[in-house]
Image (tube, rainbow, N blue to C red):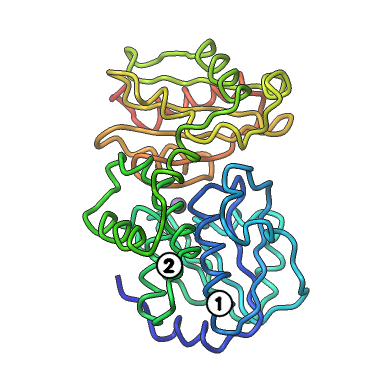
Amino acid sequence: MKISNELVEAINNSNNVAIFIHVRPDGDCIGSGVALKLALEQIGKHADIYCDGEVGKTFSYLKRVDTINKPTLKEYDTAIAVDVPTFNRIGCYADLYKSIKCRLNIDHHQTNDKFGDIDLIDGTRASACEIIYELFVLMNLNITKEISEALYTGIATDTGCFVHNNVQSVTHIIAADLMNRGVDVGKINTIIFKNKSLGQVELQKIALNHMQFYGKNKICFTYLTKGDFTFAHCTPNDTVGLVDTFIGIDGVEIGALISEDKPGICAVSIRSKGNINVSTLAEYFGGGGHKNAAGCNIFGSARVAVKKLAKAVEEVYAGIY
Ligand SMILES: [Mn+2]
């Protein structure tokens, strides 16, 4: 990965920075955003974080996470998008991003559409937090315990706790350095991966009941309706990691969870095993992501979205399933 002087200069020359993370925020974009804010403040910059969506309670242990969407400025000289694969994933803050003079874009999605004036994209990295870490090292910033916790959170989230095949040796090397800086990995991993609310388990139960198999049982789709979320007293934020249950079934090669976010719009999380590239399937609906983990929106009710997704599989993987 080559971090350009241009990018470093743009950050050094900034005063008031707006950080943008993606809709339906996850641990990687939240960790990246918070780490960047803390580091920028260290060198005397002002930074606000914007997110089109609610930040789940899961990450409330991170310092400054409570400042997300509580900006104290209205005008900025520099915009930095982190972990945002396509411009439209900035959501309702797209116009604000566009209106800022100097626009940076830091991300690890291979499908990133390079919407910044300066882009720092490395599709080989497991998380945006790894790229942010490298940037801090290059800029000689003090990676404090609080910054380390934020960066570790992103790495752990996007690797499914170091399980996915996006993990490289460098992922572990960075995680080890963050541990040396004081991160309590047992505490953080328990919060992220081993602490489900009763409502989340209810959602899991419903999703298990809604499983549908296609392509000689190699494809498993499931869905949650708006009513299911109401019933379980949950929001779509509470489905983080749930899709792993379905791709984790022996013999299943593509798994998807369809969540009816708003009436008539479904958010779809897709996972695959091995060489099956599901970012192409997500792109079919205008989304994107990585080879084994991608996402998109599908218009229609949850049940309609399942059918549309099954039909798209037939087209995208013609002859395979
Ligand atoms: Mn990410």
Residue at 27% over, 54% down = 172
For the point 27% across and 42% down, the residue is 165
User: Mark 2 or mark 1, which is nearer the start of the sequence?
Assistant: 1
Which tag is nearer the camera, tag 1 or tag 2? Answer: 1
Name the foreground residue: 171 vs 116.
171
In front of the other: 218 or 226: 226
Q: Position of residue 80 (x, y in %)?
A: 56, 70
Asked whether, in this view, residue 40 is left or right of residue 233, the answer is left
Residue 34 x, y percent position in the rendering: 56, 62
Q: Which residue is mark 1?
A: 40
Give the distance between the C-alpha atoms of the residues marked 1 and 2, in whole angstroms: 12 Å
Residue 213 lies left or right of residue 253; in this view the side is right
Badge 1: few (under 14), some or many (20 or more) residues near its Cα, within 10 Å?
many
The type of residue carrying mark 2 is Ile
Q: How many marks on residues?
A: 2
The residue lying furthest to the left in this view is: 169
- Label annotation for residue 154: none
Residue at mark 2: 132
Q: Can you give x and y, in whole percent of width and height, for residue 114 in the image?
A: 47, 66
Q: Secondary structure at mark 1?
A: helix
